[in-house]
Image (cartoon, helix red, strand yellow):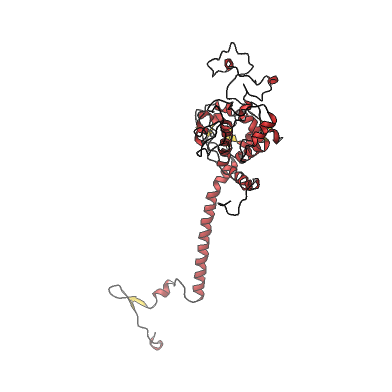
Amino acid sequence: ENMWGDAFHHGFASMSLFSKSLAILAVLPAAYVQAQDLQCMKFEDIYADGKELCENMWGDAFQVVDNYTEAYTMWFFDALNPNDATSQLMHPNGDTSICNLQYFHKTLPTPEGDGFTECHPWKEASCCTKEVANASNLLTSYGDEYRWDRCGALSPACERFFVQEACFYECSPHIGLYRRAGGHACDNSTGQCSNVYLPECDPDSAAYDQNTCTSEFTHSTWEVYKMPIRRDYCDAWLTACAKDMFCAADNGDYFSCARLQPETPTAAPASTEEKESSLEPGLIALVVIFAVLLVGVVIFLCVLYSREKAGKPLFKPLEEEGKGETKDKEGSSVALPQLPKSERV
């Protein structure tokens, strides 16, 4: 409130300008390089709506719901984490005092210091450290194949949502409830998840044994399954990224795209709309130049006409300029004496 004078007041209403800014930034052109094997396309051409984005992009990790009391958000600005109430309602016996996902995660959600700014909503109870929670590491920690900018740099508005999702995955203690193998929220009857983690079914475990594994799916300590996410959050994500480029392989599946290793990146062919927009600056400059020249010509002609009308032309006829002059022996011009009319022949 102090920084911006009377522009804002405390409360959710003050965020309207932020939302509008995201929408504006979303349509700004982003520089991009298209890798042919990644089938790079605009987000709006890959996903029909926010639901498809959140569900297709992340495999089975998330499901989009309309009942917001039974859904989580990947980002918040409240002093209290709104996901606390969601977990208490849906999983009153679930344990969010531990970090149930394990990869770069801490064992317990503990407070972080003042340098914890990138993923600040989780500062008071975070499953990630500030070394993990910075924009550069969130982008590169899992390897180049998991970068979200493989089809070219994203607009700031779009990239912010990827950072938010990464913060949510790395830092939230609530997401561990939905761990596919060993999570509290699993419905065992589906056969697609389990409340019990079996290390013999985990290829990354020293105890992995394919012969003794009895699970219908591969176990891990990091995979998330069917966590409910608010539809409005996913819709906002697509709005922010609509014009940006992303891998379209397997309907825009992030993990399918990670398995693709394009050999020769090639420049993305410009669409007709993009070609027309790229010509606009040159055409505008050309029009301006011609307009300036035209104005100059008009002004010059007006001056000529004005001087002629006043009897003071800028240019005299050649015969008038030479009248009454002749050349001396050295070739210099000398004035001839004017005879009285009576002495002229």
Relative to 16, does residue 188 appear above or below in the rendering?
above
Nearer to us in this view, 145 or 64: 64
Relative to 151, does residue 288 appear above or below in the rendering?
below
Nearer to us in this view, 227 or 117: 117
Q: Residue furthest bottom?
A: 342
Mark yes or no: residue 254 visible: yes
Q: Quadrant location of the C terminus?
A: bottom left
Provide residue 241's location: percent of width, then percent of height.
Answer: 60, 39
Provide residue 81's location: percent of width, then percent of height.
Answer: 62, 37
Q: Image quadrant of residue 154?
A: top right
Relative to 273, does residue 38 appear above or below in the rendering?
above
Provide residue 56's location: percent of width, then percent of height.
Answer: 64, 30
Provide residue 179's location: percent of width, then percent of height.
Answer: 62, 25
Q: From the viewer's perspective, tell me whether residue 303 is left or right of residue 331.
A: right
Nearer to us in this view, 181 or 282: 181
Residue at 38% x, 78% y is 324
Q: From the viewer's perspective, tell me whether residue 278 is left or right of residue 231.
A: left
